Amino acid sequence: MEWETVIGLEVHAQLATRSKIFSGASTAYGAAPNTQADLVSLGYPGVLPVLNAEVVVMAARFGLAVNATVAERSVFARKNYFYPDLPKGYQISQYELPIVHSGYIDIELDNGELKRIGITRAHLEEDAGKSLHENLAGKTGIDLNRAGTPLLEIVSEPDLRSAAEAVNYLRRIHQLVRYLDICDGNMQEGSFRCDANVSVRPRGQQEFGTRAELKNLNSFRFIEKAINFEVQRQIDILEEGGAVVQETRLYDSDRDETRPMRSKEEANDYRYFPDPDLLPVVIDAAFLQAVRADMPELPRARAERLQRDYALKADDAAVLTASRPFADYFEAVVAAGADARLAANWVCGELSAALNREGLEIDAVPVGPQALAGLLARIADNTISGKIAKDVLALMWESGATADAIIETQGLRQITDSGELEALVAQVLADSPAQVEQFRAGKEKVLGYLVGQVMKATQGKANPGQVNELLRARLQAD
Amino acid sequence: MTITRTDIEYVAHLARLEIDPAELDGYVSKLGRIMDFIDTLEQADTDSLQPMAHPQEMAQRLRPDQVTETDRRDEYQRNAPETADGLYIVPRVVE
Amino acid sequence: MSDSRLTVMEMARRLQAGEVSSRELTADCLSRIQAQNPALNAFIAVSEAEALAAADAADARRRAGDAGPLTGIPMAHKDIFCTAGVATTCASRMLEGFVPPYDATVVARLAAAGVVCVGKTNMDEFAMGSSNETSYFGPVLNPWDHARSPGGSSGGSAAAVAAGLVPLATGTDTGGSVRQPAALCGITGFKPSYGRVSRYGMIAFASSLDQAGLMALTAADIAAFLQVIAGADERDSTCADTPVPDYAAALETAVTGKTIGVPGEYFDAGLDPDYAAAVNAALDIYRELGATIKPVSLPNLALAVPAYYVVCPAEASSNLARFDGVRFGHRAAADDIESLYKRSRSEGFGEEVQRRIMTGTYVLSAGYYDAYYLKAQRVRQLISDDLQRCFEDVDIIAGPTTPTPAFELGAKTSDPVQMYLNDTYTVSANLAGLPAISLPCGLVGGLPAGLQLIGPHMADATVLNFAHVYQQATEWHLQAPGGAA
């Protein structure tokens, strides 16, 4: 039988606020245990939540970015369950009336077509703390620093049909939240997390199969592997005549498998009801207008603009707009006077390669846009060749010096004095009688060798085009 | 609405309360009595009414995104039954 | 005897005139507590050293010319308000030994005004009860008759004020917990409008119903304290940010030409006839003062208590989930987390608290939410609409606070529903978030009866005004229990 995979994703994006969703405790990552757990984070008797204004702005920004409805009125509800990292015995979330609903995002498939993925809803909620099991003599330790960190839970429609599509969608969401400056997207630190609802059904069948919810998917690679494992597991069960059980499963990256989560075995009865400590969140037109006015250009629009304004190839535009700082960098290089296509080549090529090699983000690049534009200017005016420019970039990267300074001190200026070149050309031709003979016998290819010899004699500082012309003129003249 | 022993056991588990089996029947009877009383709500015609979640007709007030709290862990943990290295300690929890 | 029940206003006058120091007033309260509390059990904790230090500080303030109207007045807080560094138990084993690291907003505002807190008063456990019999520390006795209940849940505060141990005490009112014990102990008890006073630091019972209240001998005393505690609080989202009026200034407004609505349903079966007579006598006083009495109808009154007993336990079941033995509160020995939760909670919570948690969990659980919780919220709207409709025609609603005067201890403990029906007249104000007061309006068989006044939302000044003019015209509020020395 042919099986169709159905996937819906739930993304938990930690909102990049300074303070927690319901209190003034810091959200900074990595502090000593419980030093950022204030009375509200701890659920102390008598304390009350007060909503952070910034989370409302951020959620609205996301809503506008995914063409969704930003609700005029949304309501916080309590999700009741007991767990040691959940201090109050309930999580404040949104249930029936989320702040954002009915949106979509388009993803680009391998064949270049766009596919629209529905975003059912995005709601605000508080993160839980962390349970630690190491070095505690068989006990569990609870750190509530993370408790109360704002989360935007982004729920997709079950519109994804493969692990690859799921990852594609997830990358778009990841890109988007970073563009919007609402989440740092750090998956290692758990700022951007994902659960996947996975089921399979015979192709052509309308109803969905029974789904499993996969948790602990903390990298794009693991998400793809976990979904693929789970799909195969479900198909194996069904093909053997079995039935898939609806359950929560944990992905074990060491073993590359999913297994049932013990703590979630019992049927959940969360007893949601409106949180009486909080009133409805009201977003009026003026508020929304202010958020709209403050929206950054979104990735797809920006790619289209770059393509249009700078006559870039679609691929380059896509690479350049992968993240906002990256695109900003490119545009700054152009603004500093560089030729756009040359800049695109260099930013997507050499610069990206160097960043990857060093494991750096664009924010930390040692060669600023002004400096790169300086280098590109020297290529454009034939002061140096592209090949030499690569060496110059490496030196700029190391020393922080400008391209011009390096070209001067290292004497890398291209030889454009035709008198000097002509002398070298004559010397090479005199030293290579056999090759000259071959060329004259009609073996044009040998010209490349002769160009190489001249370049070698100039230590690469000659302009290969000019050398080519000089050689040809000389060979044909004689 | 009749409350059964199973209901009581289920609800007690949800609420994380331990009920002495000897008290189970007492619970069934007292909670049953309360639920019978509550069932009188059925007679109210409320079809045209929206549920009233709150008496305060106000929009949620918003707080500026500022860190106002400092580390007071040691003070806060004085009320804790068991801590170690700044962590609240519980029996081992298996995920 | 007269000196044993000084009003706040009289104390303030004497302090102002330099006739007495805060230290003397405070020491006087402390000695009375020492003498009478062993019998009454009105206090869970008395903080003598802290109180005397605060009194000295108040006296110093006064000498420095920095005293406010309440600086140096001794009082007590219900043991549901968090007091920094002073144990706060909610009369529960769960919180035995719990010392909050912070002050409730009400506590902080009063402390800033120079008020002296002498101790924490006894109550029904987590404010769940109408008789004070659910306290882990044993019941409070009614100063009028030690065999009877002072009412609940703010029974300790009511008994302490009635017996003259303190001139004023805070309470909390979720379904009548200030007004009912005030009525049963013959004092004045006021529940402000929902949102008028911050709930921050008041250990939550049912968040959409809870409101901090004040219990004193007179409405004028309450007005003075309300002035200090009312108003917006950045730590409570549900606290209103509307301006706080001058409550004292509004007290004297004449009620001539005003209209008092009296719901006929209040006088149906269940109300003690002598109690009804006391209420009617009070209405006559208002007539004499120039007010018009107008019959009104609250046709759904009988649904208020059942609706309340859905909404309130539902919220309570969730509010009390934080007591899990992990970060604070009672912890039972256990080898696994589930047993730790269950044992800690079952050992830490008393019977009535567990019963309410069970009820609340049940009405919210899968399959019952619509039938119970949503239904109750619709009925809540119905009750609120009924009251709203009355206020189109009348300035205030009047009636009895309770169906009977103080009942004997143990009389209603076997049937929870009988106990709940004590709240018949009081819960509607909580469901609708309205301000309401109970004031002494007579004696029934030697026991106090209470007149309840309910006003429109945020018309707290009106309610206090009506109460005050009544107390200017009568002396029921000066009737002290015979047992009070």
Image (tube, coloured by chain):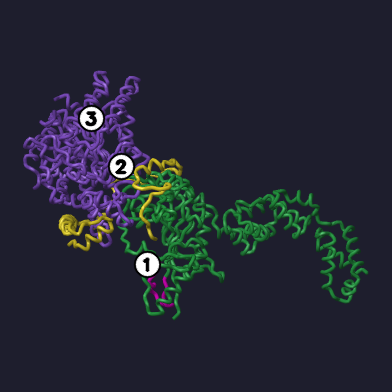
- Chain A image colour: green
Q: Check disc 3 and report its element: helix, strand or loop.
A: helix
Question: Which residue, as the protein is rendered here, is positioned at the far bottom?
Answer: A1
Say above or below: C32 vs C309. above
Q: Nearer the viewer, mark 2 or mark 3?
A: 2
Question: How far across and down, in percent of the image, does residue C288 sit?
Answer: 12, 31
In the rendered structure, does residue A204 fall within the stretch colored magenta? yes
Q: Nearer the viewer, mark 1 or mark 2?
A: 2
Q: Which chain is yellow?
A: B
Q: Earlier in the sequence, mark 2 or mark 3?
A: 2
* Element type at mark 2: loop
Residue type at numbered disc 2: Phe
Q: C474 or A287: nearer the eye?
A: C474
Question: In the shown orientation, is residue C235 left or right of residue C154?
Answer: right
Neighbor class of circle 1 (other Cα within 10 Å; few <14, some 14-19, many 20+) is many
Instruction: Identify which amino acid the numbered label 3 is placed on.
Output: Asp
- Residue C48 drawn in magenta: no
Q: Which residue is mark 2?
A: C98
Residue B74 placement (x, y as % from top left)? 40, 42
Q: Is residue A77 above or below residue C239?
A: below
Chain designation of label 2: C
Residue type indicated by callout 1: Glu
Given residues C37 and A94, the one toward you in this image is: C37
The chain coloured purple is C
Disc 1: which residue: A247
Q: Main secondary structure of the magenta part?
A: loop
Query: What residue sits right under mark 3 in the picture?
Result: C221
Q: Judge whether residue A172 can be spotted in this image.
A: yes
Coordinates of residue A389 in the picture (x, y in percent): 74, 57
Start and end of the magenta stretch? A199-212
Residue A337 left/right relative to A141: right
